[in-house]
Amino acid sequence: MKKQLSFLLILSIFCFCVSAAPAEAPLVEPSGFQCYWNDAVWELGPEYEDARWSKNESGLSDQHCYVLLEDGTAEIVDMSWYGCWIPETVDGIPVTAIGLLGISDRLDYPSDLELPAWITRISEDAFRYAAHNLFTEVDPANPYFAIRNGMLLDLRNHTLLSCMNGGSSPLPADLEAIGCRALAGVRFESLSLPDGLKRIGSLAFMYCGSLTAVTIPDSVTEIGQNPFAACNALEEIRISPDHPVYGFRDGILYRKADMQAVSILSAYTGEAYTLPGWIRSVGPYAFCGNQELREVRLHDGITEIPEGAFLECESLADIRFPDSVEFIGPDAFHGCGFTEITLPAGLRELGVMAFSYCGSLEEIRFPAGLSAIHEGAFAGCRSLQSVVVPEGLVSLDDLVFSFCDSLVSVVIPDSVGSIGSIFSYCDTPPTVTANPDSFAARYCADNKIDCVAPGSAE
């Protein structure tokens, strides 16, 4: 298991590639060094579609990326490596907030910044992509935030945003919320969350490798994406059977209203695992980081493999999908150990980086009904040699086969009418087989890629 958030590092590399490769116009303006971070903002979602880089005196994009808030102030959502501080203004606009920072897994960002007095709001998701804590001090003039016992706290809503004490201090008794990845990698062993806690953010305890048991009080009514992702020593989640929202059974933390598996503990799965029939859906990152898992069986009725569901399950080599699966989400199988994969008959769409960096993957069998393969779906699958894209597919997005250095042959049918920069960063682009009057053939001609007609000698 990679000790750092290697999948986010890959994501940042992916973001760099998007900015460098021919593609549709990005949501934020590229500019020199910031190209690396530019599309990291693009990854954050539609709420950041108006993000922009600040301008320097020459009118070029500068050091901070921001969005305008309804009150006319700015929220910082990204920083270049040489602009890693929180400015008081950007482009003459007062800065008041820090949003979901697109800085990804950068380890060379400073970790001793002071949170300035003018910041009045920090998103609970602000540090989702940060490799480490950014703020070790808070300006004494800031009445909204404080660092106590090595924990950055929002004093108004009693939210823990990040932790720097390594688990040496107990959580505050008046805590009401734990932010996204706020306690990631902290060396807890057994933990009782305080009564009165209401929300646990996505991936809150990710990579807490020493954590063996946790107690969740009845006051918790909201849990984000698997807060215990890659907590491979975790054996017990203590929760009352009368808890109003969540339950724990057979090693699964689940949401009672829709019987969705929030977290499936690796201590219970063993090498071969069959999802129990009483679970109706699998939540994002539910199996993330499980290092024992080699074989999985999913039952009929599962319609989606969500974001990060099996991310970095490095030993996973065999999964039996039911035909009911229609969508495989972003990073769902990133870094898994497949040598071959048969996708389900009902599959309609493959998400961003769905099977990226499955380095042993040699063969993919697609269903006939697949209509779209999104960005980077098979990026970094360096053992992949040939691919036959199914008839009926409509689009192949950017970077689908990027860094696939062994790829020598791709068959693209007439149905494909949209192709991005699918072979970026391959040592040599593969030969494409396509009908001479097809969109794929024109794409190859425009991009100087070898193309042969079906049945002809290469």
Image (cartoon, rainbow, N blue to C red):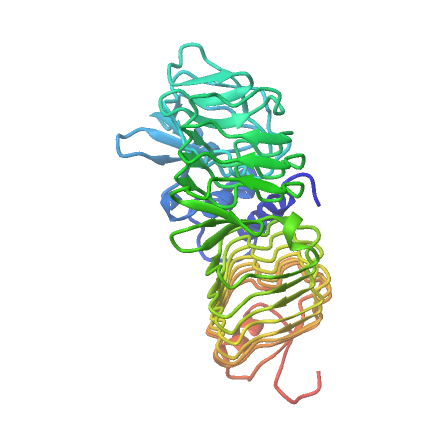
In which quadrant is the C terminus drawn?
Answer: bottom right
In which quadrant is the N terminus drawn?
Answer: top right
255 or 55: nearer the eye? 255
Which image quadrant for residue 110?
top right
Q: Residue at x 40, y 34 (%)?
A: 219
Residue 356's spot in the image, x, y percent? 62, 58
Q: Residue at x 54, y 61 (%)?
A: 276
Identify the residue at the far front of this view: 241
275 or 294: nearer the eye? 275
Residue 63's spot in the image, x, y percent? 49, 31
Residue 419 lies, with reference to residue 93, above or below; the image says: below
Identify the residue at the far left of this view: 71
449 or 142: nearer the eye? 142
In the picture, measured across the screen, residue 366 lies left or right of residue 363, that is left
Q: Is residue 91 visible?
A: yes
In the picture, measured across the screen, residue 408 lies left or right of residue 97, that is right
Residue 265 lies, with reference to residue 84, above or below; the image says: below
Identify the residue at the far bottom of this view: 455
181 or 265: nearer the eye? 265
Q: Residue at x 55, y 70 (%)?
A: 446
Residue 122's spot in the image, x, y percent? 41, 28
Residue 375's spot in the image, x, y percent? 53, 59
Which image quadrant for residue 218?
top left
